[in-house]
Amino acid sequence: MRLPRRDAGFTLLEVMLALAITATTVFALLYMRTRAIEHVTQAKALRSSWSLLQQKAGEYEEVKIDDVKEGNESGQFEDDPSASWERVTEKVEMAAIEKVDEDHPREMWKITLRVTQQLPDGTSRVSQAQWYRLLKEAEAAPEGGGGGGGGGR
């Protein structure tokens, strides 16, 4: 008489354990893939925002210093209607530095550029840059006052 062999196959418990391990691995891989896609999407949006910021800053750097005016400007980007820009230009006095000569006053232009981009999920991403440009002596002179008038009859 021969006894039945118990080593002939897997038990139900072993099969269930193997399926649980496989399912856990598959779900972990899917989760990591989803997170990687989200990070790539965020990186593309950030790169796009910085690219628009650099584009607008480059345009403004090409403006002659004599044409720089104090105030605010804003607008939309032609190639990306979901993005807008705002530029604030103001005079600031650099009290910490001495006036070197007539061509280098202590006043400078402070330029702040902000790009706002609407994302597909309804949120917005804001990128900002700030820099300074020298102000010409003629523009640094105090306002008002000034010499005599002419005219009159």
Image: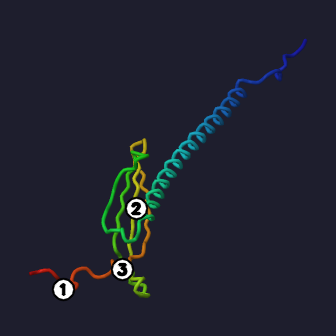
Q: Where's residue 103, x and y in %?
A: 42, 83
Count residues near mark 1 (Cα–Cα under 10 Å), then give few for <14, some for 14-19, many for 20+: few
Could you say which disc has been placed on residue 93 in the image? 3
- Residue 100 lies left or right of residue 5; in this view the side is left
- Front residue of 19/58: it is 58
User: Quadrant location of the C terminus?
Assistant: bottom left
Q: Amino acid at mark 3?
A: Glu
Count residues near mark 2 (Cα–Cα under 10 Å), then give few for <14, some for 14-19, many for 20+: many
Sooner in the amino-acid sequence: mark 3 or mark 1: 3
Residue at the left extreme, as displayed: 153
User: Quadrant location of the N terminus?
Assistant: top right
Q: Where's residue 80, x and y in %?
A: 42, 46
Q: Residue at x 56, y 45 (%)?
A: 40
Q: Dot 1 lies on which element?
A: loop
Q: Dot 2 lies on which element?
A: strand
Sooner in the amino-acid sequence: mark 3 or mark 2: 3
Please state the total of marks drawn on the protein image: 3
Q: Dot 3 lies on which element?
A: strand
User: Can you identify the residue that label 1 sits on?
Assistant: 148
- Give the mark toward the camera: 3 or 1: 1
Q: CA distance from mark 3 to mark 2?
A: 19 Å
Q: Residue at x 49, y 54 (%)?
A: 51
Q: Where's residue 36, x and y in %?
A: 58, 44
Determine whether 135 is above or below 28 in the image: below
Where is residue 134, by image quadrant?
Answer: bottom left
Q: Where's residue 43, x and y in %?
A: 53, 49
User: Can you identify the residue that label 2 sits on?
Assistant: 113
